[in-house]
């Protein structure tokens, strides 16, 4: 009986920590979207960026992947759209 309770507790704790990690990953990805958007806009406007012209395509691909990841998380209900938007705005402003 005690073993069953212990196993139940461990499974619940693991599920909670996994969910928290997924939430952190999605909010980090949303933040990165804002950073990448700012970098791309600055580069297109001619403002010196921390990226050279050769690396700008890589930034565009990273932006696309992060957007797809966050959109999937929003559709699955792991992150709400408002939080994703706010984190993206913060990332944009921080750059």
Image (cartoon, rainbow, N blue to C red):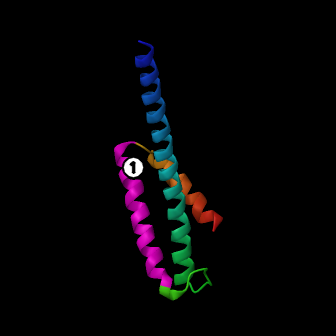
**94 with respect to 59 (left or right):** right
Report the front residue among 68 and 83: 68
Tell me if residue 79 comes above or below residue 16 in the rendering.
below
Determine the residue positioned at 46% across, 40% down. 19
Residue 91 in percent (x, y) is at 58, 61
Q: Is residue 10 magenta?
A: no
Residue 17 in percent (x, y) is at 50, 38
**78 with respect to 34 (left or right):** left
Determine the residue positioned at 53% across, 55% down. 28
Tell me if residue 85 comes above or below residue 34 in the rendering.
above
Determine the residue positioned at 40% across, 68% down. 64
Residue 85 in percent (x, y) is at 50, 54
Magenta span of residues: 55-77
Residue 94, by quadrant, is bottom right
Task: Work out which quarter of the rendered image holds the C terminus and state it.
Answer: bottom right
Judged from the image, the secondary structure of the residue bearing numbered disc 1 is helix
Residue assigned mark 1: 73
Task: Work out which quarter of the rendered image holds the N terminus and state it.
Answer: top left
Report the front residue among 4 and 68: 4
What kind of secondary structure does the magenta stretch mostly adopt?
Answer: helix
Report the front residue among 82 and 73: 73
Determine the residue positioned at 42% across, 24% down. 7
Task: Tell which residue pokes out farthest to the right in this image.
Answer: 94
Q: Tag 1: Cα neighbours inside 10 Å, few (<14), some, or many (≥20)?
A: many
């Amino acid at each position: 009986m005690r073993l069953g309770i212990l196993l139940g507790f461990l499974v619940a704790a693991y599920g909670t920590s996994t969910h928290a990690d997924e939430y952190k990953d999605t909010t980090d990805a949303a933040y990165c979207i804002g950073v990448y958007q700012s970098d791309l806009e600055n580069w297109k406007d001619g403002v010196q960026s921390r990226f050279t012209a050769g690396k700008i395509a890589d930034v565009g691909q990273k932006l696309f992947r992060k957007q797809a990841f966050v959109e999937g998380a929003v559709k699955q209900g792991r992150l709400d759209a408002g939080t994703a938007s706010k984190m993206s705005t913060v990332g944009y402003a921080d750059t």
